[in-house]
Image: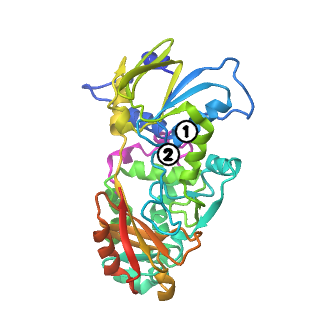
Amino acid sequence: MFMPFESAEQAKKPSVSAGRIPRREALKIAGVLLFAGLPSLPVGRQPKRAKRVVVAGAGIAGLSCAYELMKRGHDVTVLEASNRTGGHVRTVREGLAEGLYVDAGAEHFTQPGYDRYWQYVQEFNLTALPYPRRNRIMRVLQGKMYAEDDLQSPNVLKAMGFNRQEIEFLTRHAWWELPSLYFAPYLDKFTDEYRPFDAGLNKLDSVKIDEWLKQQGASPSAIRYIGNTGASALHVLWHAAILNLRKVPLFPPQVYRLKGGNQLMTDTFALRLGERVRLETPVTSIEHGSSGVRVHYRESGEEKTLEAEFLVCCMSAIILRQIPVIPSWPESKRYALASVPYYTASRPFFQSRSRFWEKDSVSPNIEFNERALNHIWRMADDVDTRRGLLVGTADALTTGDVALKTFRQYYPGKSEDIEQALVFD
């Protein structure tokens, strides 16, 4: 979130009723918080006067922001509370054999989409690899495993409880496209991804997505697989519309990762920023006024202060809303910060003596839809080794043993070659 702090005091509060922020106003602000980015200037263009800027948070947002500010000639300092850069981008090698590695955080990027990311891949001379994690996906549904072809069979779909319209659609489209059957007629109503309330669908903000799907004639089976989230119909349609505006599929079948691990991107940012990045320096409070901002932080047990003209907050909303801000946020912004949703997950991974799935002629890309193992896929095919590596996602605090038990419950071949099951939380 980019904050010229003099605007915080001058921010016009929306009309309130009974001490509450109207949901419409709050979601507008939340949209800005989630999607606002730093405008790009022509490379080499320098400011008339270098400004002092503090960036709070050294994840990929903070690092890329600081890098762009540095390139434009500004005096930038990055404060990071933890002992590493990268945030949710993390590549793990510890405990793995023969050069294997796991992207324990951010998994992949797409094309189309990620335009600025692709520019950095080229600028930093990194190698993007096609990531076959979504090729030939097997899916466990209602306790049975289905291949992609199975889920285009009218008899299979009828037995699963889909209605005639859904069966006709799925016989001609991939499984992951099912939401489009109901979403597509509404997506063109969104013309600006930052303004969901301009689509003329405001009444859907108070309707749950499962209720809306039922109103559209969706079967209970379709609702189970695409609408069992508890989110509002407007929110779900807005998200789908953003992808549509960016020409990105709802579930991009072709994705990419960086050779050597996605952390190479954030490591490169940090290397180029050098001593501008300060680790283990948590922000403890923020003061702001018409002339700039004063950022208080802790370093080596001492309380310290940085004064700057601007502060760019690139930490999570969970952390930001715990930090004292003087004067305090406008009420609308406090509501937005408090309402940003988060989820937690575990990253289970299995190292094996061989790529046993190749011998079994079974796709290792499997959606289990179980709490102990949501889905799994192969990784690190670029490493010269006979060993195999399967990586997945699971609910938070899952153990390696429980994840492996779930895998073996459904995997149709032999899996004795798995030599260790680890989890990164």
Residue 208 counted in the magenta span: yes
| Quarter placement of the C terminus | bottom left
Tell me which residue sits at (74%, 28%) in the image: 45
Tell me which residue sits at (67%, 32%) in the image: 71
The amino acid type of the residue labelled 2 equals Gly
**Is 204 above or below relative to 28?**
below
Q: Secondary structure at mark 2?
A: loop
| Residue 12 seen anywhere in this rendered image of the structure | no
Q: Given the current orientation, which residue lies at the most extreme right position?
A: 44
The amino acid type of the residue labelled 1 equals Leu
Q: Which residues are magenta?
A: 189-209
Q: CA distance from mark 1 to mark 2?
A: 8 Å
Q: Which mark is residue 86?
A: 2
**Is 29 above or below relative to 364?**
above
**Is 247 above or below relative to 273?**
below
From the viewer's perspective, tell me whether residue 200 is left or right of residue 338: right
**Is 286 above or below relative to 400?**
above
Residue 289 counted in the magenta span: no
Q: Is the residue under label 2 in contact with that under label 1 (CB below 8 Å)?
A: yes
Q: Which one is in front, 9 or 282?
A: 282
**Earlier sequence position, callout 1 versus callout 2:** 1
Q: Which mark is residue 63?
A: 1
Q: Given the current orientation, which residue lies at the most extreme top position?
A: 291
Tell me which residue sits at (33%, 50%) in the image: 207
Residue 364 location, x and y as percent?
Answer: 47, 77
Q: Which one is in front, 43 or 96?
A: 96
Residue 252 location, x and y as percent?
Answer: 54, 63
Badge 1 density bin: few <14, some 14–19, many ≥20, Cα 10 Å: many
Q: Quadrant of residue 384?
A: bottom right
Residue 175 location, x and y as percent?
Answer: 47, 72
Q: Secondary structure at mark 1?
A: helix
